[in-house]
Amino acid sequence: MKILVAVKQVAALDEDFEIRDDGRDVDPDFFIRDLNEWDDFSLEEAVRIKEAAAEPVEVAVVSVGTDEVDESLRKCLAKGADRAIRIWDAAIEGSDSIAIARVLAAAAKREAPDMLFAGVQSSDQSFASTGIAAAALLGWPHAAVVSNLTYTPGAKSAVFRRELEGGLLQEVEIQCPAVLTIQLGINTPRYASLRSIKQAASKPIEVLSLADVALSEADVGETGSSSRVRRMYVPDKGRAQLIEGDAAQQAARLAEIIREFKGARA
Amino acid sequence: VSRTDAVTRILFEAFSATEVRLFYLLGYAAIAVFCYGVYVQIRKYRRGAQLRLEDGLGRRLGAMVSSVLSHRTIDRRDRAAGGAHRLIFYGFMLLFAGTATITLEYDILEPLFGIRFWHGEFYLVFSLILDIAGVALIAGLVFMMYRRGWMHLPKLDYARPDRVPGDPDFNRPQYRREDWAFLWLLLIIACTGYVLEAARLVWLQERADVWDTRWWSPVGALLAEGMRAGGLGEQGGGLLRHGLWWFHGLIALLLIALIPFTKVKHIFTAAASLMVRDPLAAQRLPRVPDSQEQVGAAKITDFNWKQLLNLDACTKCGRCHEACPARAVGAPLSPRDVILSLREFARSTLESGVVPDAAELDIHGKKPGQVAMETLWSCRTCMACVEICPVAVEHVPIIVQMRRKLVEDGAMDPLLTKTLQTIHKTGNSFGESKRKRGVWSKTLPFPVKDARKEPVDVLWFVGDYASFDPRNQKVSQIFASLLHEAGVDFGILYDGESNAGNDVRRVGEEGLYEVLAAANVSALKSASFKSVVTTDPHSFNTIRNEYPDFGGRFEIEHYTTLAKRLFAEGRLQVTRPLKYRVTFHDPCHLGRFNKGYDAPRELLALLGCELVEMGRCKSNSFCCGAGGGRIWVPDPVGAEKPAQNRMKEAAAIPGLEVYVVSCPKDLTMFEDALKTTGNEGKFVVKELIELIREAVPARRTEEVTA
């Protein structure tokens, strides 16, 4: 019995940051890296299922990224994952969420889990598409925004609930293996103490190349992607301003501003 | 042989050989039971984890003997109990010494070497002393009975704040029964001793060596006169003496046999506990060796032998119960009950022949003997319990070691989890970017040196609250100005500094503490400075007492001593004396932890303030509630907070104008409590630094550089 959990190391922005020279992303110097918040919940859900199961269940985490990701993977191992897999190849640089999903789907094929969990979305890119795209590529049933799950590893199906608009709950039965994207709040993720993270350093992180998951360079990167980021920028601040002074002064200033605008148009 | 030389203690006179043999038999039996009990206790302690004590046996022995003989620790905050205990202790010790010397002569020296000293004047003087000792013992016991029976002291109430009525271990009536049984047993032994003495005098009234020297035992003689007046004759006296002799002897032997099994054992365990006392028990928490896989205390056997001994030393005096700020506001914690719970647990699991399975040694939970997580998380590690314990029980390391296990299990408030993750990620508890740590200094009219880039005399370790909290940033700016104006060459580490870790460690997140301590030690080591100063007592404590364990030995002081010196050297001058009526709140980590009681008070005097002490001050200062990581966890809604309790105490001072603090966390906690207790407008909360600024008006920058 195996549950595969796809996780991502996300980047949070420091207070002041600069855009990368090519203008398509933030300069990585200003990133504070951490495990994606949603993935904390999906991993916790997998570990809880494992702990509650009568049969032995393996929880493996998989991530796409450079060795910087190892820090987050070790956190996952500290929280109860048995094994971590990291897939990287320089060609993966520039992949969109669908290309990343292709890598994850290839890893899932290799691992053949009973269930694949992912977070609903990542907090840095917010496409909310990676998990679902992986399901499509695998040809597995899928469901998004799962907020409650009843699943016994090895069972033919699982029952879960989703929260809909207007306070509605939808209870769904799904055939396994399936891909579920897990919503925040489904559980309370445990704390990984620094000691446990340190001790998790002895658990293996398996590093795979594209070839290991039977993909080629053409499947990933910009060539394997159907979208590309053109530009990342901070929009100009709104130009509202407060006019101070007594009524006459305010009126005078207002008139001045209107004249300026008219002048600009002319 | 002169007349007085013949005088000696009447021992087995008129006893048959069988009776004497029976007595010896019973005596050996009592000693055997005693020895077996001691063996069981020692075996129990040895089932704990190992610990190697650091320094000299002689010094420890000296410290213990001095504490025991002076009763210094028992006198504190309860002179009456200390005095009564002193009467009992010295009375009992003298009587015991008397009995022991008789045994020494009768059973050892005389039969082996023919040496006799228990006669003549020596005997008579000793007899007088023992009579007085008996009076002292009885007086002490009677007072203790009055105290337990009629004084209704809250600290002697065994009802537990962490249990509810109906729980099997809620108020533990068996403790009360044992207390009374102990008092009565001693009282009966003492009283029968006198009656026995009197009966002997009546019985032997015809023997001049006995009767003529009777007033050397004044109490016995008085009683004997009474008995004679009441019609007791020689024969009756003889019978009474014979019967009482056995009664007195048997209960005395019973007491000896019972020592290891009852509270009487405190005469040994308390002394031993005082001997292994760690003067930095709460200030410097124990390290977890890298090789040790398990971090916290999960099982009773995870405590070391010294901690198990501590549990047995507790005399239920209730001083920690009284001093605990968590208990005072109704939180489910009494340090006394943590200790007593674990003691019961150790007794039921580790005194039997075989140690039970690991599953039965789990000390976490709600069953009798176990400690609940709510109890452990209520602790603010303020050290009030450790500081006042007369027998050197060290509660704080026990609680923190149990918390370490809770942290490993993630059994804590979600907000605390969040804070620890934030500290791990950003190096500060505010979740601010590292780069912003020094931003508060940017608005100053002078640059604050970056100690990572240039050497300074004084390195200022700022700490999280003084760096990031807007209210405390103002205080930091004032302190920087004062240092600048006083011509102190100082600098800060900017984003090279991390949370000092004092509170992270006291939460029980040892791994994170190790990371923070290592980061700060390395940052400090790479800077060039003569000494460190801080306005934060929490940082002060951990850098001073705990960083040495991580390879960082730095000379560090709290700002109050530096400021005092700057005044003494004339580098700061009071030009506008303040006439405020103030009270001073000793921060736990400056006062109790590091004995920094005087400098802030001397500064207040220098500034011209009239200091009115609160009832709970200096070593008995009442924690603001922020310690042990509790500043990151909101207190329960509706219940009184420790800071509010404290504000009410301060508000009772007539005409109070300023409540002075010298700790960033105190400023935050008490300004909040001032509002929530409705005292806003009546008096204000201020940092001592702010008062210094008022009394030492700012000089313009040109004047300073000129």
Image (cartoon, rainbow, N blue to C red):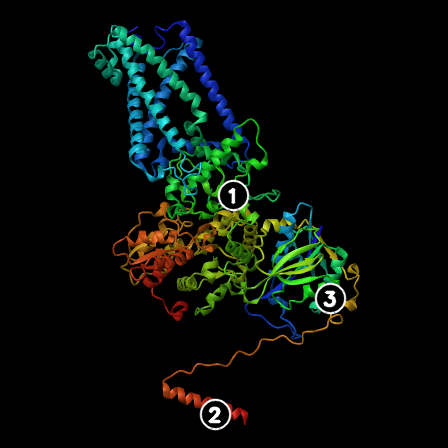
Q: Where on the picture, by quarter, is residue B22? A: top left
Q: Which residue is mark 2?
A: A259
Specify whether residue B16 is in view.
yes
To the question of a shared chain for discs 3 and 1, the answer is: no
Which is nearer the N-term, disc 3 or disc 2? Answer: 3
Residue plotted at (66% across, 60% down): A180
Amino acid on which the number 2 mark rests in the picture = Arg
Front residue of this view, candidates A191 and B444: A191
Q: Chain of mark 1?
A: B
Residue plotted at (34% across, 58% down): B674
- Categorize mark 3 by other alpha carbons within 10 Å: few (<14), some (14-19), many (20+): many
Q: Which residue is mark 3?
A: A92
- Categorize mark 2 by other alpha carbons within 10 Å: few (<14), some (14-19), many (20+): few
Q: Which residue is mark 1?
A: B402
Q: Chain of mark 3?
A: A
Front residue of this view, candidates B40 and B61: B40
Amino acid on which the number 1 mark rests in the picture = Met
Quarter of the image where the N terminus of chain B is located: top left
CA separation in Å, label 3 and label 1: 47 Å
Q: Chain of mark 2?
A: A
